[in-house]
Image (cartoon, rainbow, N blue to C red):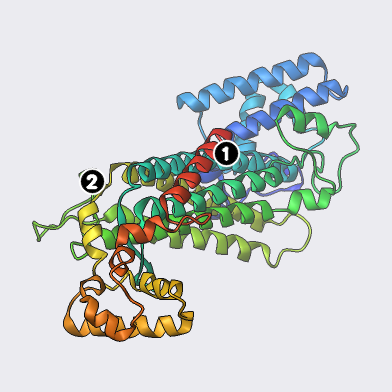
């Protein structure tokens, strides 16, 4: 078969080279963006007088036919044509004749593939963002249901202070709002048109790249043709966003895995998001959470792959850049599935409030309350901290909770401790007092939820 670029070649490409260099096995995913870009290019060529209006209409109609054939499964992809662009252009010429050969006027595969991939990545970032926003909505929904539920808040994975489950869930909601913001910010840099750069130096044809960008809903055009065809930092930035999303998902997966262990018993896993053991009948494994935690590594790998591909490339286009598609496609499949699955899993989780409340008594989570109580009695904080530490040691020695120490024992440690200390040591009271902005108290949590509701309305 004669290649579309084969004019100066006398011998055909070796079969194993064709197999090694083809990209159609994965870049066929970009067909819709390639067709949209080509149709916009054809219309612009007509407006600029490079093609006639009739020629542009034929090209646009032929490309519509190809899109229909692809989506109905009738299109025959030919590996020997290397990529999505040449497959579509070759078929277009079969359909509309020699006018199909005019479509490529004023452009190169270099700016064509850059345009297609930018549109594709931008489209996928918008999908990710919708899924992130939906997940924030599920976190908020579950937080509203759990405002009265308390559990141990941890530092160093050790019991620290009592917090509301709503506050804990909202912490993740806020993480994902930042992910949504990063995606929106990234997408504005991704959706910039390189068309008109041609191979690297621009073109002599009187093109109007701005009108193509406007038709395609892009935010502008490139300022430098060499940068336009060789830039792939938009893929790196998108994969960084993907990696951060997956990292946040993994952190919550880690919590689910701990909490589902009967030693914690803080959640019951939904059957639909769990699996069993082939040998141990009692097992109910958090496989979705575990796999999601594991898939973070492959997305990190996708980011590392792109950084490595680009780090040694001189200007401008190099064939290495063909390797930019698979890392992104892999990350896209992983992020899309993970966000959707996490939303479903979180919505179906059962929180065990009694187990969480029981755990409050393990680890002296109200010790800070006693220290703050002593400060309120006029004792310097460092001294109050020392007295409280002695009280914890005494309770630990006796095998009781801090609030179970008799008043006489507490008074022996500090004569300013009175009967009112037991009100302070109450876990619900400890949480209720913490209403500084962003805190775990009910007033502060309610303010967070109201703010998130407004954020969801603004980002719907």
Is the residue 383 above or below the residue 351 in the image?
below
Element class at badge 1:
helix
Residue with the mark numbered 2: 270
> Is 343 situated left or right of 44 in this image?
left
**Residue in the foreground of this view, choosing between 459 and 91:** 459
Image quarter of residue 57: top right
Residue 453 at least partly seen: yes
Judged left or right of residue 354, residue 388 is right
Image coordinates of residue 191 in percent, x first then y, are 69, 41
Q: Quadrant of residue 392?
A: bottom left
Q: CA distance from mark 1 to mark 2?
A: 29 Å
Mark 1 or mark 2, whichever is nearer to me? 2
Q: Callout 2: 10 Å neighbours few (<14), some, many (20+)?
A: some
Pick the front one: 109 or 153: 153
Is residue 32 rendered to the left or right of residue 277?
A: right
The residue that appears at 74% across and 22% down in the rendered structure is 99
Q: Residue at x 37, y 47 (%)?
A: 342
Q: Which residue is mark 1?
A: 126
Q: Are marks 1 and 2 in contact (CB under 8 Å)?
A: no
- Quadrant assignment for the C terminus: top right
Quarter of image, res 259: bottom left
Q: Is residue 62 above or below residue 324?
A: above
Where is residue 256 shown, x and y percent of the image?
A: 31, 57
Dot 2 lies on which element? loop
Residue 268 shows which numbered tag? none
Q: Quadrant of the N terminus?
A: top right
Decide which of 214, 444 is in the foreground and name it: 444
Image x and y of residue 405, in percent: 21, 76
């Amino acid at each position: 078969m004669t290649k579309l670029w084969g004019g100066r070649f006398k011998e055909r490409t070796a079969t194993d080279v064709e197999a090694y260099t083809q990209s159609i096995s994965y870049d066929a995913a970009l067909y819709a963006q390639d067709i949209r870009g080509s149709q916009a290019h054809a219309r612009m060529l007509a407006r600029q007088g490079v093609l006639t209006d009739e020629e542009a209409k034929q090209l646009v109609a032929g490309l519509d036919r190809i899109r229909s054939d692809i989506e109905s499964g009738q299109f025959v992809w030919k590996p020997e044509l290397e990529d999505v662009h040449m497959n579509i252009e070759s078929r277009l010429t079969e359909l509309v004749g020699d006018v199909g050969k005019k479509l490529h006027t004023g452009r190169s595969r270099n700016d064509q593939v850059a345009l297609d991939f930018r549109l594709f990545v931008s489209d996928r970032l918008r999908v990710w963002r919708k899924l992130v926003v939906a997940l924030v909505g599920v976190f908020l929904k579950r937080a509203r249901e759990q405002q009265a539920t308390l559990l141990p808040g941890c530092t160093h994975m050790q019991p620290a202070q009592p917090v509301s489950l709503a506050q804990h869930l909202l912490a993740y909601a806020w993480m994902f709002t930042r992910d949504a913001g990063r995606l929106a910010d990234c997408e504005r840099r991704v959706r910039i048109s390189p068309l008109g750069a041609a191979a690297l130096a621009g073109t002599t044809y009187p093109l109007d790249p701005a009108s193509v960008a406007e038709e395609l809903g892009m935010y502008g055009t490139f300022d430098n043709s060499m940068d336009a065809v060789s830039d792939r930092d938009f893929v790196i930035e998108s994969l960084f966003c993907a990696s951060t999303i997956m990292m946040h998902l993994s952190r919550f997966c880690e919590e689910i895995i701990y909490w589902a262990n009967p030693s914690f018993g803080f959640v019951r896993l939904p059957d639909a998001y769990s699996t069993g053991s082939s040998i141990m009948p009692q097992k109910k494994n958090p496989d979705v959470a575990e796999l999601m935690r594991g898939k973070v590594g492959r997305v990190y790998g996708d980011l590392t792959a792109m950084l490595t591909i680009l780090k040694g490339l001189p200007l401008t286009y190099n064939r290495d850049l063909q390797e930019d598609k698979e890392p992104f496609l892999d990350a896209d499949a992983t992020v899309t599935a993970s966000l959707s699955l996490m939303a479903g899993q979180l919505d179906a989780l059962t929180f065990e409030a009694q187990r969480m409340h029981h755990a409050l008594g393990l680890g002296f989570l109200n010790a800070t309350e006693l220290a703050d109580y002593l400060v309120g009695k006029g004792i310097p904080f460092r001294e109050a901290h020392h007295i409280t530490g002695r009280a914890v040691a005494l309770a630990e020695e006796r095998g009781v909770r801090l609030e179970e120490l008799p008043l006489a024992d507490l008074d022996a440690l500090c004569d300013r401790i009175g009967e009112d200390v037991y009100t302070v040591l109450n876990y619900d009271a400890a949480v209720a007092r913490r209403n500084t902005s962003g805190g775990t108290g009910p007033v502060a949590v309610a303010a967070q939820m109201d703010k998130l509701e407004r954020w969801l309305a603004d980002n719907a």
